[in-house]
Amino acid sequence: MLLVITILGVISKNATVWIAGVGLLALRLWPGNQPLAWTEQYGLKIGVIILTMGVLAPIALGKIPWSLLVNTMKSAAGLAAIVVGVLVAYLGGRGATLLTNQPTIVTGLMIGTILGVALFRGVPVGPLIAAGILSLFTQFLRG
């Protein structure tokens, strides 16, 4: 399955997916399962930390002054961004829970993400949020 995901990543020109696939293949071939188990346990948390650091880097570099941040939060777009940010964080939390409880769902989410990248020029940060949306759908369908 990792080889298929890696190949799909190459075909869709999705470096994030194929690099992750190659990295996991390498860890899978590593003697013992300790590095792979560590990745399973901490990989998502570390990835979210690095992603958050990347998003916050312009603030750390002083490219976005405090006054601009405050003024943006007072605008309609800034307030909408806060609401959407809360919603996405909520969905991400639900997605992480779903992926932890039902890891087999990852395959479908990855195929959907790869198709989204290949067909709609998407960005492959969607599986966690997609899992959150899926968890809402499945909860709704169960009644």
Image (cartoon, rainbow, N blue to C red):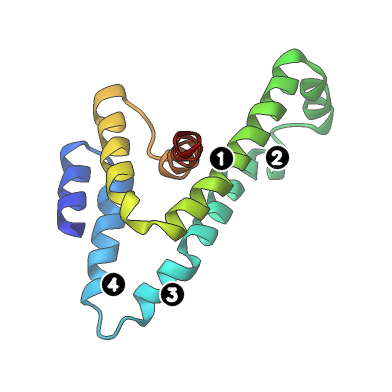
Q: Which mark is residue 38?
A: 3
Q: Nearer the viewer, residue 106 or 52?
A: 106
Q: Which mark is residue 59?
A: 2
Q: Secondary structure at mark 1?
A: helix
Q: Is residue 107 above or below residue 101?
A: above
Which mark's residue is nearer the viewer, 2 or 4? 4
Are the residues at dot 4 and dot 3 in contact (C-beta closer than 8 Å)?
no
Residue at the spot of label 4 = 27
Residue at 39% from the left image edge and 34% from the top image edge: 123
Tell me, yes or no, whether the two marked residues, 1 and 2, touch with CB atoms within 8 Å. Answer: no
Which residue position is annotated with label 1?
A: 91
For discs 1 and 3, the disc positioned in front in the rendered view: 1
Q: What distance separates the C-alpha of mark 2 from that of mark 4? A: 35 Å
**Contact, mark 3 vs mark 2 (Cβ under 8 Å):** no
Question: Which residue type carries mark 1?
Answer: Leu
Q: Earlier in the sequence, mark 1 or mark 3?
A: 3
Taking the spot 49% from the left edge, 55% from the top edge, the residue there is 47
Residue 65 horizontal/vertical position (percent): 78, 32
Label 2 environment density (alpha carbons within 10 Å; few <14, some 14–19, many ≥20): some
Q: Residue at x 62, y 41 (%)?
A: 90
- Foreground of the two, 116 or 18: 116
Q: Earlier in the sequence, mark 3 or mark 2?
A: 3
Q: Which comes sooner in the sequence, label 1 or label 2?
A: 2
Q: Distance from label 1 to label 2 (Cα)?
A: 25 Å
